Image (cartoon, grey):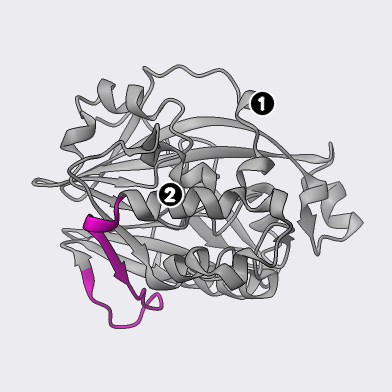
Amino acid sequence: MLIAFMPTAKLAAQDVHQVETFDVGSYKISVLSEGHNDGNTGLLTGATPEILKQYAPNGTFPMGMNAFLVRTPDKTVLVDAGYGKNLLDYLKTLNVTPEKVDIVLLTHLHGDHIGGMLKDGKPVFPQAEVYMAQAEHDYWSSDAEMNKLAENRRGGFVQARAVIQAYRSTLHLFVPAALGSASVELIPGFTGIAAYGHTPGHTGFLLQSGGSRLLIWGDLTHAMAVQMPHPEVALSFDVNPAQAVAIRKEILAYVAKHKIPIAGMHIVPPAMGKVEKSKTKGESYRFEPFSFKKK
Ligand SMILES: [Zn+2]
């Protein structure tokens, strides 16, 4: 989502010492939570009054804001960089200095996902190879797209371009594959999954280690309470809401059918769990969060 949607000041107080870590095969996945708040249902589109009454009766929905750290036996991989508010403190509690981050995978270039990439205009992760979808890079680099917005609303483009520029020498652009299709690993154990709609190059990352899998689906949902039972509900900030709805339905169906656990940037911590399809209600799903306190 856009940074304006989730003002940092409104985020709940943080305890940076609580970093939850979960095993996926030999990989360790840690949730780096930048906080959570209540999203306003006024930001949703396509929800009937009945849906809102049932799933967001107070006019709000709970919303997290996370990045994830994945430690494989030989690489330290950051998936998105949050606002950069508490990110480095979290990494410190995991004994990860910014120099130790080998790879950054970006789901998309909204400010709440790339805010932690730069400090005073300089790369925060000086050794990192940075991966983003070609379509995402091209969208934010396009003057034609930027000029569609009023001049005072171009801050997102300015920020995205600053990140692209600062990491230009280590930038890897790729074309994500459809979930379930033959695809090439970006780095061992990580595949880019096309989830276009929220932004033109919005990408999920499928992790595979041993027989275990996890799909970090980025911003496939923002309002879990509403969009799991009703994936047809979109967000007014989606660049292409119809496309976002279609890919949400497609990915939900796939992960439910194949029992692939998921993690999301706007799911309230623990922010990971499994998706189950409703047996009675057609295209309707429920989310069962993992319980943490594993090592
Ligand atoms: Zn976003």
Amino acid under label 2? Ala
Q: Residues within 10 Å of mark 2 (few under 14, many from 20)?
A: some
Tell me the distance, in whole angstroms, between the alpha carbons under discs 1 and 2.
Answer: 25 Å
Asked if ligand 1 lies within 8 A of label 2, the reply is no
- Horizontal relation, residue 139 to residue 49: left or right: left
Q: Which is in the foreground here, disc 1 or disc 2?
A: 2
- Horizontal relation, residue 113 to residue 41: left or right: left
Residue at left offset 53%, top offset 38%: 65
Q: Which residues are magenta?
A: 167-185
Residue at left offset 40%, top offset 41%: 81
For label 2, the SS is: helix
> Which residue is most to the left?
74
Residue placed most toward the observer, 275 or 16: 16
The image shows residue 276 at horizontal and vertical percentages of: 53, 60
Asked if ligand 1 lies within 8 A of label 1, the reply is no
Residue 162 numbered tag: 2
The image shows residue 76 at horizontal and vertical percentages of: 19, 43
The image shows residue 245 at horizontal and vertical percentages of: 65, 70
Amino acid under label 1? Lys
Q: Looking at the figure, which quarter contains the C terminus?
A: top left
- Above or below: residue 88 compared with residue 39: above
Residue at left offset 26%, top offset 22%: 92
For label 1, the SS is: helix
**Residue at the spot of label 1:** 10
